[in-house]
Image: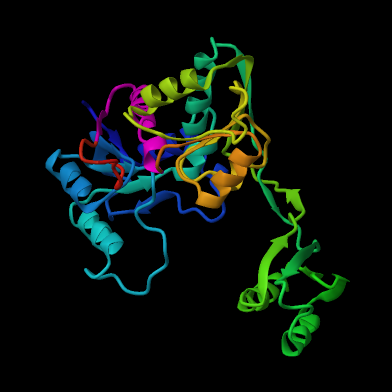
Amino acid sequence: MSGIAGKEVLDKLNRLVPLNLAEKWDNVGLLVEPSNTNSLKIEKIFLTNDLTEPVLQEAIDGKANFIISYHPPLFNQFKTVNQKSIPQRIAIKAIENKIPVYSPHSALDSCTGGLNDWIAQALIQMGNGKGHVRSITPFMENPTTSHKITCYLNDSHSSLPTDAFSQLKLNSTFQYVDNKRIELSCNQTQLPVLLSLVQSLNKEIYHYDISVSEKIPSMAKGGGKLVTLENEVDIDTIISGVKKLFKLEHIRLGRPLDTTTTKKVKTISLCAGSGGSLIFNEKADLYLTGELTHHVILDACAKGSYVIVCDHSNSERGYLDVFKTNLEKLFDNKIEILISKLDKDPLEII
């Protein structure tokens, strides 16, 4: 391999995966930059989903002189650089070995031909190769929205205790509906305080509901994808295809609670990694992602949808093979591309 100068490698990477597509909270681009990065002749690039210390040593042993880690190994701000922190140890060792570290993360999720496009196109093939894909629009809380909390009292109580009444009244619009139910309204800023007060009364209140907050579309491009197949397919077909795509023996499946009929799948809302903030912005027969909370899964199944959860990085790592091919074309086969053999999800089913 003849190699390419570091500056040219970075320029080409940023054209392939535009960093302006990354989420605002994310940390993408060149995260570790040894002093000779621009002039360094890059001959071997090492790909990994997560840059752990064993994976970094694997890259060093493999004579790699550039690392692309899908997840950013550096995320939080810090005031010192020392050996106490694992991310800092990784950065120090990379610099000592003159290896730049680059992360595309959420920019790679959203770009054309990126991670979520790869999953979407594979799902269409599972549906006989016909269907269409569109991005899912992210939503954000409307700060002017009024939130409503409805509290249902125990049989032994006809009203809230006096001291609680005064606290709740100060922090919300308070209304008795009947002798067993009250409604509390507040804005987005007041909501955390009010929730804390309501939860502190859990011995008095046996149940409370929070109304669904109004949300407004965000200007950001959505990394998630909504796939609509031309024809419905059996869930078993999707399960088999997802296992093959992600190279997994097992996945976790949630089924619709209504078991009177076997529901088929036509619409799939998906996002690799932790996609709960995106995929539920669309109604779908199936929600596919890496990780979700227990109650979110319960809610989706109660509403009649399937849920497939694969564990976070299991839904991402398989794309490295595709990314490797794309990089080889990008660099005209002048750079050798290696994929980590030690990189794996920290969780396993045993």
Q: Residue furthest bottom?
A: 163
Residue nearest the observer in this picture, 140 or 167: 167
Q: Quadrant of residue 332?
A: top left
Quadrant where the N terminus sits is top left
Outermost residue to the front: 156
Query: Hey, which residue is sitting farthest top in the picture?
Result: 128
Residue 83 lies in quadrant:
bottom left
Q: Position of residue 270 (x, y in %)?
A: 55, 34
Residue 164 visible? The answer is yes
**Observer-nearest residue: 193 or 181?**
181
Task: State the residue at coordinates (28%, 55%).
Answer: 35
Q: Is residue 186 left or right of residue 203?
A: right
Instruction: Give the answer, above or below, for where 28 lies relative to 290.
Output: below
Question: In the image, what residue occupies the spot 59% across and 32% down?
Answer: 225
Q: Is residue 329 on the magenta stretch? A: yes
The reply to whether residue 227 is visible in this rendering is no
User: What percent of the width, then of the height, locates residue 304?
Assistant: 64, 34
> Looking at the image, is 192 positioned above or below residue 211?
below
183 left or right of 330 in image: right
Relative image position of residue 271 (x, y in whole percent):
53, 37
Structure colour scheme: rainbow
Q: Residue at x 66, y 77 (%)?
A: 204
Q: Residue at x 39, y 47 (%)?
A: 71
Instruction: Specify the quadrant that holds the C terminus.
Output: top left
Q: Nearer the viewer, residue 77 or 176?
A: 176
Where does residue 185 sit, x and y in percent of width and height? 81, 69
Region of the chain picked out in magenta, as a range: 312-339
